[in-house]
Image (cartoon, rainbow, N blue to C red):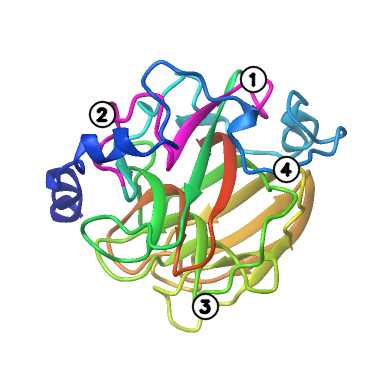
Amino acid sequence: MAAALALALSLTVLDAAAAAADPAVPPPGIDIGLDGLEAGVEIDPSTGPGTDRDQTRGTVPVGPREVFVGDWETGDFSQWEVCQSALTNGGCGSVGRGNRSMAIVDAPGARQGDHAARFTVRRGDKPNFGGGERSEVQSSSPGALVHEGDERWYEWSVQYPQEFPNPTGGWFIVLQWHSASGSPPLAVNISNQGTVDIGGDGVRNHPKRTIGPVRRGEWVDYVLHVKFSRNAGTGFVEAWENGRQTVQRTPRATMVDGENYLKQGIYRDTGPEVTLVQDGLRVTAP
């Protein structure tokens, strides 16, 4: 794990001049509000910006001990350690308020508090180290890192554009728990059929469970409860969508080695340009 993180941090930020030359990249200090989203985004007023996600997530019992927060309320990406996109691969301190791949959205574009994060991926948006198209943040801080036997609750919200297309590639991940190498043993995926699923190809023959549909034009609040273990008889997952339990406790392995680190954003195979806004991520423990 340490080697993988060191590799990610050692890779350099792409030529800043190239990013500055892209007219879609906002200059430093410019606030990016809801107008920065793709054209055609419409928000259901009952679940749109400025509403209280605690109306739904607050109804779900979670752990009493808060161990990690990645809710963007710093107004930048500093809560996370590594930012990876076609423009950046390195410490999030260099990203500031963002660029055309990842940017801070100010209220009223936030679900919780005053800020959220907008992730955008265009066709061909692969970092200089390869892999799939991505715009992601990563943390291996003590609160985000998990080990054998750890139990965690993950709360977060996603805003889906009205014209969000069903993925067409081999994978589309919005939250993942990654091991030192290979595919993630646990991930939240958007399927080609437009469902939000609990998966993780790093674990063979894992049971896929659907949390709910992609609710276009809405903010959707999620809670995922996980027991981390390499043993399918010990590990489990269960999930809630908008305060309603949609995935009952399901035994499964959720690790393949000694630890998992946390990533959020968009990581996919390929497809047309797409944007998601995510907010309010909070991790609690017993």
Crowding around mark 2 (Cα neighbors within 10 Å: few <14, some 14 to 19, many 20+) is some
Between circles 4 and 1, the one closer to the viewer is 4
Count of numbered labels shown in the rendering: 4
Rounded to the nearest angstrom, the CA distance separating label 2 from label 1 is 23 Å
The tag earlier along the polypeptide, 3 or 2, is 2
Q: What is the secondary structure assignment of the residue under circle 4? A: loop
Disc ID at residue 107: 1
Q: Nearer the viewer, residue 232 or 198?
A: 198
CA–CA distance in space, label 4 to label 1? 16 Å
Q: Which residue is mark 4?
A: 41
* In the displayed structure image, the side of residue 135 where residue 215 appears, left or right: right
Asked if marks 4 and 3 touch (Cβ < 8 Å), the reply is: no
Which residue is rendered at x = 42% and y = 75% of the image?
203
The image's mark for residue 94 is 2
The residue most toward the right is: 46
- Label 2 sits on what residue type? Ser
Q: Nearest to the eye among marks 4 and 2: give it.
A: 4
What amino acid does circle 3 point to?
His
Pointer 4 and pointer 1: residues touching (CB < 8 Å)?
no
N-term mark: 4 or 3: 4
Res. 26 image quadrant: top left
